[in-house]
Amino acid sequence: MVTAIVLMNVERQKVNDVAQALAGLPGISEVYSVGGRYDLVAIIRVPSNEAMADMVTHELVKVDGIVNTETLLAFKAHSRHDLERMFSIGS
């Protein structure tokens, strides 16, 4: 599984519309509206690097209202939440 965090600047009037459109795309597990330098953050989880490349270069560009993105590829999860989920398998 390949995970990326995409930070987005969005046209102000379209933040909710863009968030809804993104949340409906397969491969996007979560979308957050945030304060600060960016307007939205999307978490993408796909099976391969090729699927990630397709999502970032072909699918995101189709969403009207996204002005700028910065994509961060995740290498390793250090979240306690993920560890708890892993150890709860079969319980």
Image (tube, grey):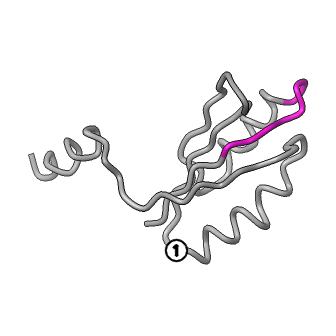
78 or 85, nearer to the observer: 78
Location of residue 58 in the rendering, given as x and y in whole percent from the top left corner = 79, 66
- Position of 77 with respect to 16 (left or right) is left
Image coordinates for residue 73, horizontal then vertical, percent: 54, 60
Residue drawn at (81%, 32%), measured in percent from left and top? 17
**Image coords of residue 91 (percent x, y):** 9, 45
Q: How many marks?
A: 1
Q: Is residue 30 above or below residue 27?
A: above
Quadrant of the image occupied by residue 14: top right
Identified at 88% across, 44% down, the residue is 67
Looking at the picture, does residue 68 appear above or below residue 50? above
- Point out the image quarter for the N terminus: bottom left
Label 1: element kind: loop
- The reply to whether the magenta stretch includes residue 21 is no
**Magenta-tinted stretch:** 7-14
Q: For the view shown, which residue lies furthest in the bottom direction?
A: 50
At x 83%, y 47%, the residue is 68
Mark 1, residue position: 48
Left of 19 or right of it: where is 72? left
* Residue 54 falls in image quadrant: bottom right
Circle 1: residue type: Ser
Residue farthest front in this picture: 37
Q: Position of residue 83 (x, y in %)?
A: 22, 46
Q: Residue at x 77, y 66 (%)?
A: 57
User: Mark 1: few, some, or many residues within 10 Å (few <14, many ≥20)?
Assistant: few
Q: Within the magenta stretch, is there residue 10?
A: yes
Going by the image, does 90 lie left or right of 74? left
